[in-house]
Amino acid sequence: MNHFHKEYKFARRGGFVLFEAMIATAIFAISVIGLARCVEAGLNAGIVQREDSRARRALINWMREVQAGAQAYANIPLGFELKGEFAGMRLHQSVVALELEDQNKQKVEGILEVNLEVTWGAGGGRGSKRLKFYACPSAL
């Protein structure tokens, strides 16, 4: 009878070890899934940051071209597709003549507010970036 009692204890202990192994495997699997999601989020953040940087460069380049006189101070409400490094992006430009007065209440003419916006498709959604600057083309 003593022999049977030892085998019964061993069988109960073996079942407990199996249960421990199953729980440890489940915890490990959940950890691996969580780690994979963190890596995916990091990669997506890198893509978004790269697109944001590319849009910022497109806006700054266009602003410098407008300020240098290579592009007109004109409204482009429907925008146009950019090419080259900025392919896949669409640039919109609006120009508003400002009505300003100086400290002597005299009208200041020729100052424009230029609004630029770049839009692009980003991971199934849309991304956009804006830039506003002021210009005095008559001073050129």
Image (spheres, helix red, strand yellow):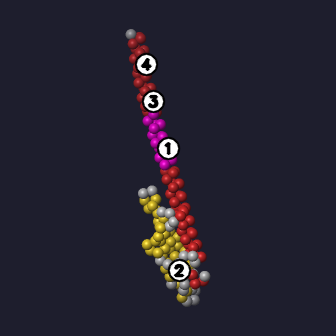
* Residue tagged 3: 21
Answer yes or no: is residue 93 visible. Answer: yes
Near mark 4 (Cα within 10 A), the count class, few <14, some 14-19 or many ≥20, is few
Amino acid type for the residue under numbered disc 2: Leu
Q: Earlier in the sequence, mark 3 or mark 4?
A: 4
* Residue tagged 1: 35
* Residue tagged 2: 112
Left or right, residue 119 beside residue 103? left
C-beta proximity under 8 Å, tags 3 and 1: no
Question: Residue placed farthest to the right in the image?
Answer: 140
Amino acid type for the residue under numbered disc 3: Ala
Amino acid type for the residue under numbered disc 4: Phe
* Residue tagged 4: 10
Q: Residue at x 44, y 26 (%)?
A: 17
Amino acid type for the residue under numbered disc 1: Leu
Q: Is residue 33 above or below residue 20?
A: below
Q: Quadrant of residue 53?
A: bottom right
| x, y percent for residue 41 | 49, 50
C-beta proximity under 8 Å, tags 3 and 2: no
Question: Is 108 included in the stretch rendered in magenta?
Answer: no
Determine whether the residue tagged by mark 4 lies in a helix, strand or loop: helix
Tell me the CA gap for discs 3 and 1: 21 Å
Q: Quadrant of residue 133?
A: bottom right
Q: Earlier in the sequence, mark 4 or mark 1?
A: 4
Q: Earlier in the sequence, mark 3 or mark 1?
A: 3
